[in-house]
């Protein structure tokens, strides 16, 4: 249905290299935004006035009446010094597109260009979200608060996947990327002489018991078919051999693919911290930071996603879930949608200083999203 011709393919690759040379960090994507604005303008694709500092929202309105769906790309880079030897390597010291958001942005631009040329195929409107600040997990929330998803029926997105070949797209309903939560737990006791522990309330005992007992929440409170980890990654308390300290601070993270498991874990972790502290006559300060929800793909769109991939001429593979976070999750908390892995045949994983990808995947991604948009709107 849609084919990126050679000329457009070359042009998109050039544009990707432009962005790659000039990476910008979260909420500082001013040049990136200007570039995208210019490129959308060159193709006569209208930009919506959401009053964003960085990031841009564009729209292609079909010739037929119908609902609005959204396709999202992120646009920010990372504070990493690039160590590839590609000719278009980052020209900004200490900053790099090491997560491939430059690739995401031009692929979505490609889809917008394709759809803009064939509006007769669209039964509704496609909104293109070029989102800032994914790497700090704030951009999606910022755009939802700005009303970017108001009246949008469903949202679609992707992340490049270096371990998948170009031309393959990974698909999976429900949890694709884990929720990410942070915690900090302070056990408070009464410090004192190590030789007279009976006159202290020892927070090291509380913390030690907690570190081992907390794993029983995974073993005994989480459904056999759910997946979760609790990792305690830092313990701080005491500074010498003969003094019992007055507090111990634990930090760590929880990852899971099911919202139900996420809620169970946070509530039992808190209960266990309280009972552990109280059991020893101490007290606890339990801080929970809900960082990112699960990227929870809607089953209702799996079929059309699979069909669109095949119709665009590419191969569906089963997606393996990943425990990194992705702020696309916020959109899926708000409206249904579907996020896929785009094969890019890269030498290194995300956030590596030698991260790179095969630019042939731009064509694949653009054609997939254009095909998907037509099919979703036709079914709506
Ligand atoms: Zn990243
Ligand atoms: Zn990323």
Image (cartoon, rainbow, N blue to C red):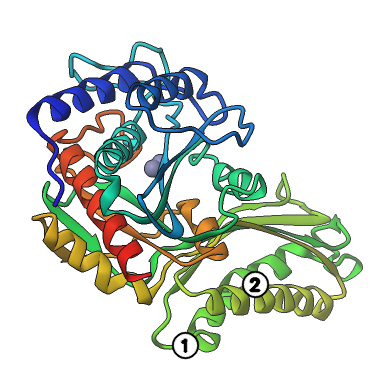
Image spot of residue 53 (x, y percent): 61, 27
The residue carrying pointer 1 sits among few (fewer than 14), some (14 to 19) or many (20 or more) residues within 10 Å by Cα, namely few
The residue carrying pointer 2 sits among few (fewer than 14), some (14 to 19) or many (20 or more) residues within 10 Å by Cα, namely some
Q: In terms of secondary structure, where does tag 2 sit? A: helix
Q: Is mark 1 within 8 Å of ligand 2?
A: no
Q: Quadrant of residue 209?
A: bottom right
| Mark seen at residue 187 | none
The C terminus sits in image quarter: bottom left
| Front residue of this view, candidates 240 and 361 | 361
Q: Which residue is mark 2?
A: 266
Q: Residue at x 64, y 32 (%)?
A: 51
Q: Which residue is mark 1?
A: 223
Q: Determine the CA span between mark 1 and mark 2.
A: 15 Å
Image spot of residue 301 (x, y percent): 34, 71
Image spot of residue 41 (x, y percent): 40, 23
Q: In terms of secondary structure, where does tag 1 sit? A: loop
The earlier-in-sequence mark between 1 and 2 is: 1
């Amino acid at each position: 249905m849609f084919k990126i011709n050679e000329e457009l393919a070359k042009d998109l690759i050039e544009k990707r290299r432009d962005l790659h040379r000039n990476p910008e960090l979260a909420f500082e994507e001013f040049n990136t935004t200007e570039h995208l604005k210019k490129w959308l303008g060159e193709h006569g694709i209208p930009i919506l006035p959401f009053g964003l500092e960085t990031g841009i929202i564009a729209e292609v309105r079909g010739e037929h009446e119908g609902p609005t769906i959204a396709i999202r790309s992120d646009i920010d880079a990372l504070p990493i010094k690039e160590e590839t030897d590609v000719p278009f390597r980052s020209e900004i010291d200490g900053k790099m597109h090491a997560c491939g958001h430059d690739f995401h942005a031009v692929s979505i631009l490609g889809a917008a260009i394709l759809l803009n040329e064939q509006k007769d195929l669209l039964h509704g409107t496609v909104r293109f979200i070029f989102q800032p600040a994914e790497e700090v997990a704030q951009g999606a929330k910022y755009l939802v608060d700005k009303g970017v998803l108001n009246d949008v029926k469903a949202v679609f997105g992707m992340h490049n996947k270096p371990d998948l070949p170009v031309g393959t797209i990974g698909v999976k309903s429900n949890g694709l990327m884990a929720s990410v939560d942070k915690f900090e737990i302070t056990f408070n006791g009464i410090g004192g002489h190590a030789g007279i522990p009976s006159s202290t309330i020892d927070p090291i005992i509380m913390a030690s018991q907690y570190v081992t007992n907390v794993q029983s929440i995974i073993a005994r409170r989480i459904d056999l078919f759910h997946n979760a980890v609790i990792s305690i990654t830092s313990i701080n308390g005491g500074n010498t051999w003969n003094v019992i300290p007055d507090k111990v601070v634990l930090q760590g993270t929880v990852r899971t693919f099911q919202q139900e498991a996420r809620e169970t874990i946070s509530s039992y972790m808190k209960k266990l911290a309280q009972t552990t502290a109280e059991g020893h006559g101490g007290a606890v300060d339990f801080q929970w930071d809900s960082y990112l929800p699960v990227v929870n793909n809607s089953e209702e769109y799996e079929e059309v996603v699979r069909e669109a991939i095949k119709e665009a001429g590419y191969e569906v593979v089963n997606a393996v879930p990943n425990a990194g976070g992705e702020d696309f999750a916020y959109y899926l908390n708000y409206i249904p949608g579907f996020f896929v892995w785009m094969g890019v045949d890269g030498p290194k994983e995300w956030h590596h200083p030698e991260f790179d990808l095969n630019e042939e995947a731009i064509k694949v991604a653009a054609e997939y999203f254009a095909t998907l948009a037509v099919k979703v709107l036709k079914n709506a």
